[in-house]
Amino acid sequence: MTPAEILAAHGPRESMEYDVVVVGGGPAGLATAIRLKQLDADLSVVVLEKGSEPGAHILIGAVMDPRALTELLPDWKERGAPLHQPVTHDEVLFLDEKGARATPQWLIPGCLHNEGNYVISLGAVTKWLGEQAEALGVEIFPGFTAAEVLYDELGHVRGVATGNLGIGKDGQPHEGFQLGMELLGKYTVFAEGARGHLGKQLIEKFGLDKGRDPQSYALGVKELWEIPADKARPGLVVHTAGWPMDEHTYGGGFLYHLEGNKVTLGFVTGLDYQNPWISPFEEMQRWKTHPAIRAHLEGGKRIGYGARAITAGGLLSLPRLVFPGGALVGCDAGTLNAARIKGSHAAIKTGMLAAEALVPALKAGRAHDELKAYPEAFEKSWLFEELNATRNFKQWFKKGNTIGTLMTGIEQWFLPKLGIKSPPWTIHRTTPDHARLHAASQVPKIAYPKPDGKLTFDRLSSVFISNTNHEENQPAHLTLKDAAVPVAINLERYAGPESRYCPAGVYEYVQKDGAEQLVINAQNCVHCKTCDIKDPTQNIVWVTPEGGGGPNYAGM
């Protein structure tokens, strides 16, 4: 049965009405909710979170600029926010296959200086923000997915519908069936993170990206390690460029020392890469074997794993933030600052700005219109100034890593020395990430080393420690517009890139009845959204699974 048939047979759906519905319980969504209740305690606010609890699906984020958090909750230290480890030292390393060149401290550009920032678990911070929101009277519904945007007769957003429960693989309701419900708001705020399922639909429906550069993404593959006490350097922040990436592939590593003898580390690969043989997961494993990285980990134990796509296009790729009935905040809009490798402060700030536009509108009796005050306030904010200063970052790297590194140095180090905060030129991109792949026959094949099980690992053992689980008897949430395309185009022309770009081993090509076919292991999915972004034919569409499914990132 189709969703429409299920609704016709079992509907109508129950509905609940709120002043504001927030989709997504990450930093942006929770900041929106907290600020709303700070400004007007009588507002009814609900937050939907598809993870089992706020923070369960939160991953990338380990060094936090507390500026926005301090604006939102000035007494966060007294409230026990889990920002315990200040950054003590920055290292920026340029790697070749065997060696490393450290950038002198005086040459490190401002965007990579972290004085006053904290090495954190963003999952723990998000969980804490959820507690602050609930204490103010915000209703949080964990384990509930927002599966559908609801529109009124004028085409304005009026809320969302949650996903149905108890639908089997065959599309039929079974004994555990529960029809989704409608959550209706005078305004609806979308805070789903990068490549939000509904945010993507809204951008298309309302043409929010008209006149903007196409959004650009990267995939961050991340691990958490426990290391011997004598190797621990709490507060050390290491960033690397160069190896194992080639000249034409954007990417870099990060390694941060937390408190408690823990190290969080990962590798970011730009999803605009051209060689279909690249596997971001394998690049991360290979990067760990470099002597400069291995030295931090030897004798330690890997205790966590995850992966998530991040927005990297910056200000020039930012869609219009509002539409009739709602707004985009945080990475659903794409406010992460790729040059700083930080997005949580931007997420919190956009949530606050949206809330500060919402409250006067609600007090004036408005509903379902455009919150023009939100983008107007954003353009006057310190966040806009910050994103404007780094607006060319990803664009320069499209021209190769040498030019990208040189121009980042000029724009983020040299010009500020002259008192020029924002570069006097703007560089644009026109090609989306999925259109960048070359044919497999045109580029060299990459042979990755086998994992040793001590320092390097395979994907399946990695997914196991991400605590990923989905109710098995449900329709696959990784859908194909055309089932023939994977074999006919992706395999034939690009050698099946989905079997390599997925960091969870979801996609594999197998022989069956003498022919190749694509198998989708949806159970393994860590909700990174890479397939939705990088599929060269845009044939794969990620939709929401049952609520509560996916990873559960403890301590990440």
Image (spheres, rainbow, N blue to C red):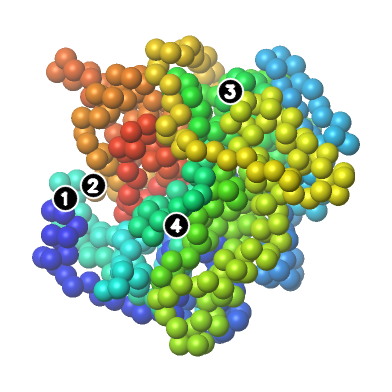
The answer to whether the residues at label 3 and label 4 have Cβ atoms under 8 Å apart is no
Asked if one can make out residue 355 in the rendered structure from this viewpoint, the answer is no
Residue neighbourhood size for the residue with mark 2, other residues' Cα within 10 Å, grouped as few (<14), some (14–19), many (≥20): some
Mark number, residue 391: none
Q: Is residue 506 above or below residue 206?
A: above
The answer to whether the residues at label 1 and label 2 have Cβ atoms under 8 Å apart is yes
Residue that badge 3 annotates? 248
Q: Secondary structure at mark 4?
A: loop
| Mark-to-mark CA distance, 3 and 4 | 30 Å
Question: In terms of sequence position, does the residue under pointer 2 or pointer 3 come before the other?
Answer: 3
Frontmost residue, 552 versus 348: 348
Q: Is residue 461 above or below residue 191?
A: above
Q: Who's the residue at 58% across and 53% down the image?
A: 335
Residue that badge 4 annotates? 208
| Mark-to-mark CA distance, 4 and 2 | 30 Å
What amino acid type is highlighted by mark number 2? Pro
Q: Nearer the viewer, mark 2 or mark 3?
A: 3
Residue that badge 1 annotates? 171
Asked if one can make out residue 543 in the rendered structure from this viewpoint, the answer is yes
Q: Nearer the viewer, mark 3 or mark 1?
A: 3
Q: Who's the residue at 64% across and 63% down the image?
A: 379
